[in-house]
Image (cartoon, rainbow, N blue to C red):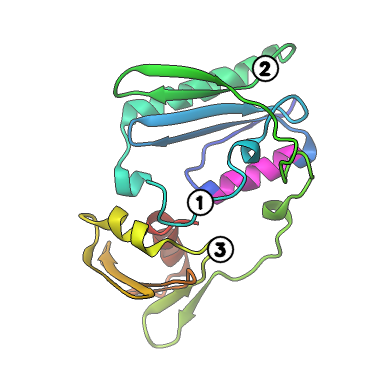
């Protein structure tokens, strides 16, 4: 039996894993942690909901807390990883009769809840068999602007919520200000100008990978 264990902190990559697993009928174990809170769910194609049954679309960048804006409690990470490993072992050793559930963990208060989840009959992934994250054409998201030590990064599928992102970056970024359809801030030694369409200019580097990492970390994907 094949199985994919999620180890990424990038939401778009999780949707890609979900597309891959559902299309090929391979179980995978989702896990995510922000602050002291975590979620775990085993996705077993054909026997329960997939990730997009719970979260049909990615939230606009800036609307959700991230590990960089809200922090992360290390015991919460350890708890979620342990639960993922336990579910993976169960699926590998005794998949018969397994019923997927969503486990919600609060490592600060010590609470764990098991929530019943159902497959969405209108799910774009496991019901309609649409896999845009898996089969989307490759595009160049970042380009270095000649002679300016600046990289332009394009947004992905959703436009950022500049107001929400401004609130999330308060106390983290320097020189934070919003001018209409622009959000400007300085972080990790770089100046960032974010436009309403999701495009950003990241000054202080010509390294595309570095610019993409900064964008994904502080703006979102």
Residue interval drawn in magenta? 12-22
Around disc 2, counting alpha carbons within 10 Å, would you say few (fewer than 14), some (14 to 19), or many (20 or more)?
few
The CA span between labels 3 and 2 is 34 Å
SS class, disc 2: loop
In this view, 28 is above or below 129: above
Which of the labelled discs sits on residue 59, or is there none? Answer: 1
Asked if labels 2 and 1 touch by Cβ distance under 8 angstroms, the answer is: no
Sequence-earlier tag: 3 or 1: 1
- Closer-to-camera residue (150/133): 133
SS class, disc 3: loop
In this view, 147 is above or below 75: below
The residue mark sitting in front, 1 or 2, is 1
SS class, disc 1: loop
Inspect the magenta stretch and tell me whether residue 20 lies in it.
Answer: yes
Sequence-earlier tag: 1 or 2: 1
Which residue, given by chain and number where applicable, does mark 2 sit on?
99
The CA span between labels 1 and 2 is 27 Å
Q: Is residue 217 left or right of residue 158?
A: left
Q: Residue at x 76, y 49 (%)?
A: 130
Residue 166 x, y percent position in the rendering: 30, 60
Around disc 1, counting alpha carbons within 10 Å, would you say few (fewer than 14), some (14 to 19), or many (20 or more)?
some
């Amino acid at each position: 039996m094949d199985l994919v264990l999620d180890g990424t902190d990038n939401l778009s990559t999780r949707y890609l894993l979900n597309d891959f697993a559902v299309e090929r009928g391979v179980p995978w174990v989702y896990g995510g942690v922000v602050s002291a809170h975590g979620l775990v769910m085993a996705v077993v194609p054909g026997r329960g909901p997939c990730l997009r049954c719970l979260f049909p679309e990615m939230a606009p960048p800036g609307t959700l807390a991230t590990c960089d804006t809200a922090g992360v409690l290390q015991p919460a990470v350890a708890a979620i990883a342990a639960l993922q490993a336990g579910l993976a072992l169960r699926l590998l050793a005794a998949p018969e009769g397994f019923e997927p559930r969503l486990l919600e963990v609060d490592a600060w208060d010590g609470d764990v809840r098991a929530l019943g989840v159902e497959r969405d009959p209108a799910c774009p992934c496991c019901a309609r068999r649409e896999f845009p994250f898996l089969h989307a054409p490759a595009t160049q998201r970042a380009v270095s602007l000649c002679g300016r030590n600046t990289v332009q990064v394009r947004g992905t599928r959703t436009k950022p919520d500049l107001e929400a992102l401004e609130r999330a970056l308060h106390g983290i970024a320097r020189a934070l200000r919003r001018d209409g359809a622009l959000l400007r801030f300085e972080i990790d030694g770089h100046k960032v100008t974010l436009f309403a369409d999701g495009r950003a200019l990241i000054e202080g580097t010509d390294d595309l990978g570095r610019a993409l990492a900064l964008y994904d970390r502080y703006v979102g994907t």
